[in-house]
Image: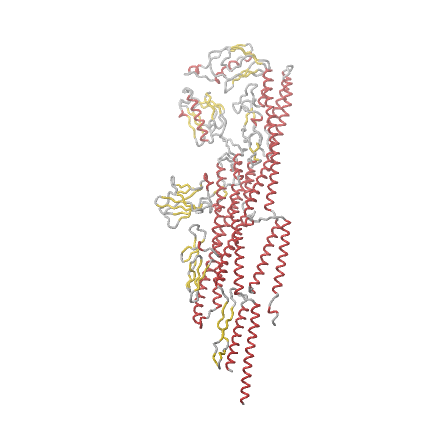
Amino acid sequence: MSSLIGTSLSGLMAAQSALNVTSNNIANANTVGYNTESVSLSTKPAIYNDGAFVGQGVNTATVTRSYNQFVSQQVTSTTSAHAQANTLSTLAFGVDQILSNQTTGMSTVLSNFTTAITGVANDPTSVAVRQALLSAAGSVTQQLNSLSSQLTTLNTQTNGQIQASVSNINSYASSIADLNTQIVSAINGSMSGQLPNDLMDRRDALVAQIAQQANVSTITQANGSINVMIGSGQTLVSGSHVAPLSVGASSVNPSNSTILLNGQDISSQITGGALAGTLNFQTQVLNPSQQQLGLVATSFAEQMNTQQAAGYDMNGKTGAAMFNLATPTVIANATNTGSVTSTYDPTSVGQLQASDYQLSYNGGNYTLTQLSNGAVTTPTPTAGVITGPGFDINVSSIGNGDSYLIRPTFNAAQNMSMVMTDPTLVAASATNGYTKAANVFQINGISIGAVTGGTSSATQSTAVAAAINSSIAAYNLTPAGIASPSDITADASTGVVMLSSPSSSAIGITGDISDTGLSAGTTPAGLVTGSVPTLTINPGDNSNALAMANLGKMGSFNSAYTQLVTNVGNVTQSASLNSSAQQSALAQATATQQSLSGVSLDQEAANLIKYQQAYQASSKAISVAQSLFTTLIGALQ
Amino acid sequence: MRISSSWGQQTAISSILNQEAQLQKTQTEVSTGIKTLQSSDGPSATVSINNLTQSINQTNQYQTNNDAATQSVSMENLSLQSASGILNQMNALCIEAMNGNNNASDKASVAAQIQSLNLQLVSVANTQNVNGEYIFSGTKSTTPPFTQDASNPGAYDYSGNSAQRMIQIGPNTSVANGDPGNTVFGAPTGPAPATIPAAGSVTNIFEAINQFVTTLTTNPVKGSAQTALGASNAFTINGVTIPAMAAPASQLAATPPISDAVTQGTSVATAINLLTATTGVTATSDPTTGAITLANTTGSPIAVAGDITNTGLTVATTTSSSTLQASLSDISKGANQILSISSVVGGRLNTLTTQSTINSGSVLNMQTALSSVQNVDEAAAISTLNLQSVALQASQQAYSLVNKLSLFNYIS
């Protein structure tokens, strides 16, 4: 009898705990990271009684959770891969939109600029048309500045995102360490090594959270705690001990971030998760875009400035620079003892690359490394200046063992400015007025041979003085005037020619003396000081403006920008394709995991019925036992 | 395979969301009509689009240039036509003037008419365009090309230059905007000293016309430059003996002796002018070359005979009619030059028209290519839109159907 009650009671207990587990499953059906728990029952040891082994009921052995290590790891690794591709794709998409958009991109302003230059070439005397060119140039500069600053802002935001990711990882890691301690003590405290399922579920959920941020792997220890490794095997959590991650600045590119674990740079080992996506965004999209934008800005400004200098403006002066580029950024290492400066070289602007350079100096040897492709050269300076592709470095004050980061294109688009405000300074003409056909004039009746004009006041006056000299030399003019070449002087800065006669005899000048630097008339005192040659300007000459228009025509500006846009587009497209592919893989792995450990409400409903019936049956058995006892007692009275 | 309840929900919802996203994209394509809104939609298409857009812009720019050039060239054409018209009138007058039956007053009145036509011609040469630029000044377009020389009233100075402004109307085609005045109307000898060459070799048409008029009324006889100085000469003008000339003693005494054409010319002219009352002839010497010009006011022939070596005079007799003939041939040459420049200008207008047609054809081709790369096929896009919205509706309906199924509905 007692065994009957005992057995039924065990059945009741078992059904009750099974019902508890089922209701727990139902309650946690939507909890993230929850693995379905099930009760495993075992029979109590049988007792030999009356010639047979009689069972003693059921034991609730343990509550197990449906958890498969392999499937779980699949989910973790696909989560990291998907997060990396998704983050890169989303971030790159933003940059792509900015660059491709007609209002924020460069195509419209560059084409307006070309139109404006052609306008000047068609009508070089109109001040209004020149003003239009200056405002178009201003628009180009503004657009470059704004694009560059947008990219810089994105970079700052990205660095912030990286910082946030890292602090998230750190907090998850310390939570995992705490859970490790709790789990170990729970296992030790429970009888027969029962596993604390909910704690372990929570721990696995935290590992999945870290996987979102960076690629992880775990190793389970014998005592129930896990070690978490990040990247390619760097230990993040070991039992209850956490190694903190931190963010530092990259030595190659100070505006980028690197991830440090115990002071060591592990950025290159992080290949999955949002962190990898963000780091890739910096190196594959932001940096190259900034460099190429700077390349567009530098080549545009330098070519325009060079073409300006080759022509003459409306006032007949050599064209002034239209754009100001500042100088290439130089970042010195903290341990340097000397200093260097760098300037752009307009004659080799075509050799500029979208790359930073590392210059180091050791014991008399210079090493220049191009960081985009790792090419190393060992240049020797001429007069303290090293010539790089498109820029020069002045190394006269360099210290031994110094190392510098030279950035010719990175900040160029940000630093470029348009400095010309006066529309008459646009150099549309390729000729100025010193160039003159032959002059014929006489000194004291002596015809001086034709003077072919120079291209500046200096060459003009020198040519005139030389012509006078050679003509005078053929005659002996002592009674009439100028005796020797020393009596003829030409002032190169003003172009004025002076004639003196040592005998103070009269000097008479007649004929075509325009632009010669001489003055007409006769001076009885024997000294003639000429006047500054008048500069005759060719305002209708458009040859230099035509050459400027051809700079844009070659498409060199626009094609450099197109290259930039296409690069970003390519990265974005491949990242988004990758993201879709990874998403399918993630969905597949999650489906497998969910089919194994997800809660199915229908299944739980069936379990409810099952255990309810078992409970009812067991309680019926108890009531039968009770009625048997009552019958027995009644029989004995 | 087991489906957990929450996972089942999630997959259904995410598929609905995906379909909505695709529908959204198709909707944007239909409403903007553009397939590749940004570079990532098609990076290689982006390159073609950018290149085509740039070529189209470039060609449109050429068309604008073409319009500007057509305006200038047409204006030049009109000016040249009016110049030719004036010269036709002048030709008739000149021929009438050379009629031997004219007396001095007839000649004077014809001369005045010719002179006023000449001034009209000069003002045509000094035409300005709408920007105030002088069209015949070359690239010195803010200075008037032809002005009368201050020291020599019959001569003109050309203040422009010989350069042409080129306008680009095609990738390898440029057209000149105008012609410099010294090519169209001939290069004068000025600026100072401006001396007009002998009749028959005058290059500038205004100076040729002026010389015609001067010869008509004053009968000048031009000599040529002499440089070597010799011993005394004796010669006659209209039968009157002009005394021998000697070089200035100071120059002869120099070692080596100085030969100076200008001083010689001055001495000869002075000697002739002393006898003007008798000969009726005045002499002027060229300040640069020393050549002597003889003129009288009656228009009657001037006869020079005797030893005139090194005097700066020309040999024998010249009558005014041969000079006039020579001047007339200068004028004809000038008129022909204007006509030939006219035909060059006409050729330019043709080039402009042809290039304009080529350019617009090319733009059309490129725009077609651009459209095929960039634009959406509206019909295809709309039918895709329909398809996707039907699929979305089906997903949503399936979702609501499946969600109603639960075992809890059947166990009370």
- The quarter of the rendered structure image containing the C terminus of chain B is bottom right
Q: Position of residue A442 (x, y in %)?
A: 47, 22
Percent coordinates x, y for residue A14 in the rendering: 52, 75
Name the quarter where the N terminus of chain B is drawn: bottom right
Residue at the left extreme of this rendering:
A363
Query: Which image quadrant is residue B409 in?
Result: bottom right
Is residue A620 placed above or below A153 in the rendered structure?
Answer: below
Measuring from the top left, give residue A476's x and y in whole percent.
41, 19
Give whichever of A397, B249 is nearer the camera. A397
Furthest-bottom residue in this view: A637
User: At 60% from the left edge and 48% from the top edge, which residue is drawn?
Assistant: B34
Look at the image and tell me whether residue B147 can be seen. Answer: yes
- Decide if residue B278 is in sight here: no
Left or right: residue A318 versus residue B77 is: left
Residue in view at x 45 percent, y 38 percent: A347
x and y, in percent, of residue A120 in the image = 55, 37
Q: Is residue A339 above or below residue A192?
A: above
Q: How many marks?
A: 0
Q: How was this image coloured?
A: secondary structure
Work out whether residue A260 or residue A60 is closer to the camera in this orientation and state it. Answer: A60
